[in-house]
Image (cartoon, rainbow, N blue to C red):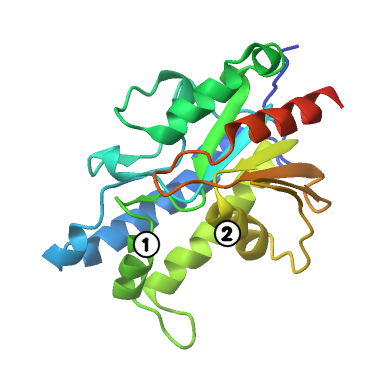
Amino acid sequence: MPKHEFIQIKNQNMTAETYYNEIMKPEIELFHTEMMEKLNSDEQIKKLYTGWKVWFSPILINPEILFIGINPGGGEGGDLTLEPDGILQYIFDESAGFNLKDDINEVFNEKELFDLVDLAYCVKTNYYYLATKNSDEIKKIGDFLGREKDKSGLGDKFFQNSKKWSNQILDIIKPNLIICEGKTAFILLTQFALELKKIETNGQDVFTFYCEKLNATIIMFERLRSGAIKNKAMLKKVLIEHFTS
């Protein structure tokens, strides 16, 4: 049997990929259509939108690592991409000046980690699927879409859906290790999606947290303004300890 098998969703006779295709994808696509109808009404706001992408990897069960960022960057070309990629983005992406991609490759291609982790068996997604050049623009788009006191606005729905879809992905992927790409991604995952009130982390520049709710370890690394990893040596050390303990 393959090392990474697709999950059988509890009480449903379907794989993780089938669950995504039949349950999640139609809902995500429908919301995107509704969102674009409103964004197209304002040229200035529409310029903030640079695409929509869910997966930057295949859909795997129990991956060696699940990478979670804030949102896709500005390089999606305005496209709607709902299908998974054939291989982890960090392996094949050739974007110039992609500091995080370069750092991830540098860390994982060092011999000590290269022998422990195969990036081909890792999954990558983001908390928000909405691509923008700057993550601060997500709130601007959300506010434009509509935030109501009773939480019924289209902007409210965007944030509610992001939380729900993130939890669904955690449930079907069932990762043993999650790497949050920066502090904001960590807060979105733990405090917004998982609604964890008490979070005790260990570390400096690179933080570790064991999540009982997921039965998984979460690692968060600090990032520089450029998007690069603040302390690659420390991340490497923490990962080696995790995979050899």
Q: Earlier in the sequence, mark 1 or mark 2?
A: 1
* Whole-number angstrom distance, CA of label 1 to CA of label 2: 14 Å
Residue sticking out furthest to the right: 245
In the displayed structure, 4 sits above or below 127; it is: above
Where residue 77 sits: x, y (%)?
23, 40
The percent coordinates of residue 39 (x first, y second) are 22, 63
Left or right of residue 189: residue 150: left
Q: Amino acid at mark 2?
A: Leu
Task: Tell me the element at label 2.
Answer: helix
- For label 2, count other residues whose C-alpha is less than 10 Å away and answer few (under 14), some (14-19) or many (20+): many
Does 4 sit left or right of 76 as displayed?
right
Which is nearer the eye, 230 or 145?
Answer: 230
Horizontally, residue 44 falls left or right of residue 1, namely: left
The residue labelled by disc 1 is 136
- Can you say whether 101 is above or below 25 in the image? above
Q: What residue is at 39 percent from the left and 44 percent from the top? A: 226
Label ID, residue 188: 2
Q: Residue at x 61, y 60 (%)?
A: 187
Q: Residue at x 67, y 27 (%)?
A: 6
Q: Secondary structure at mark 1?
A: loop
Quarter of the image where one finds residue 155? bottom left
Camera-side residue of 156 and 69: 69
Residue type (three-letter) at the residue carrying disc 1: Asp
Looking at the rendered image, the quarter that the C terminus falls into is top right
Residue sticking out furthest to the left? 43
Q: Residue at x 45, y 35 (%)?
A: 100
